[in-house]
Amino acid sequence: MSAVMGTGLAPAPAKPAPATVAGPVTQARVVRAEWTKLQALRSTRWCALVAAVLIVGLGATIAGSGTPYKVSAGNTAASGVSIALIGVMFAQLVIGVVGVLAFSGEYGTGMIRATLAVVPARLPVLWAKVIVLVGLVLPLTMLCAFADFFAAFAIESSRGGSALSLTDPGVLREVYGSSLYLTVVVIIGLALGALFRKTAAGLSVFAAVFFVIPVTVAALPQNIRGFAPYLPSNAGGSLWGSPLGDANALSPWTGFAVLCGYAVVLTALAAWQLRRRDA
């Protein structure tokens, strides 16, 4: 025994415990991870706040300024609501920023490599981002749209103006339609962020499609702008009464279907590119 002790051999080190595995990669787990990432971004909180202020604040400001909504026999109740919802026009840019950054931000920081290494199938990442963005934008903008309606027309009624009700023809559809519109807009922004992978490029294309092109086309002669109702902003705007809508606007739900078609095509292209191109 003393001979063994004299050799100076140390006892064999204990084997490390096996690493624990959280579980297989499922769509639900990817959604949870994407929701955590979205919440952690300071830009998400700021954009949500700015969008809420724009939607609710502009309608209330117009009402408080004394500008009449001009609801008369020749001007329907729904047209008065579209004036109150004018903040949606500006909020869509902020919502687009959230969508573009959801993908382009990860490419800019290089985090997308870690994300795709954990989820090698790739497409669950895209579907998860769509789910979390819809889960954020739809309830937020729906709440803001109704708050804007009640605030704007409470101020208008207190000034002796026209009182509107959600039961008036087209009013309820325009209020919740503005939220549906912004929800599809954020999906289009997400698809552009995935396609271009750079924030500046994605935002430039988004601004051109939803601001520059519609305003430019509106200035063209009537006889050469027959395609105007099919532009994404004009088509979707027919659902909530966008002031930039063309005189020959599509019917509300037809226009919304056209907007959704743009979102589906762009998302399909983003999915195809995500599967084929390296991060």
Image (cartoon, rainbow, N blue to C red):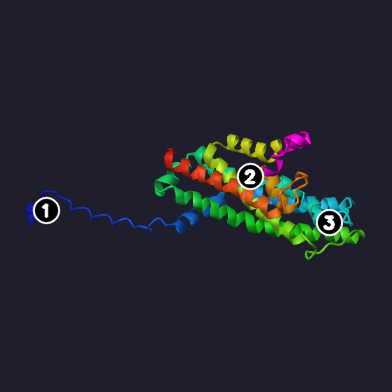
Asked if residue 222 lies in the magenta stretch, the reply is yes
Contact (Cβ within 8 Å) of mark 1 with mark 2:
no
* Secondary structure mostly seen in the magenta stretch: helix
Q: Pick the quarter of the image with the C terminus.
A: top left
Per the rendering, the mark at residue 5 is 1
Position of 216 with respect to 62 (left or right) is: left
Asked if residue 122 lies in the magenta stretch, the reply is no
Mark 1 packing: few (<14 Cα in 10 Å), some, or many (20+)? few
Magenta residues, start to end: 214-230
Q: Name the residue under label 3.
A: 76
What residue is shown at x 43% (from left), y 43% (from top)?
Answer: 275
Contact (Cβ within 8 Å) of mark 1 with mark 3:
no
Q: Distance between the residues labelled 1 and 3?
A: 100 Å
Q: Pick the quarter of the image with the N terminus.
A: bottom left
Q: Which amino acid does label 3 sit on?
A: Thr
Q: Quadrant of residue 142?
A: bottom right
Q: Distance between the residues labelled 2 and 3?
A: 30 Å
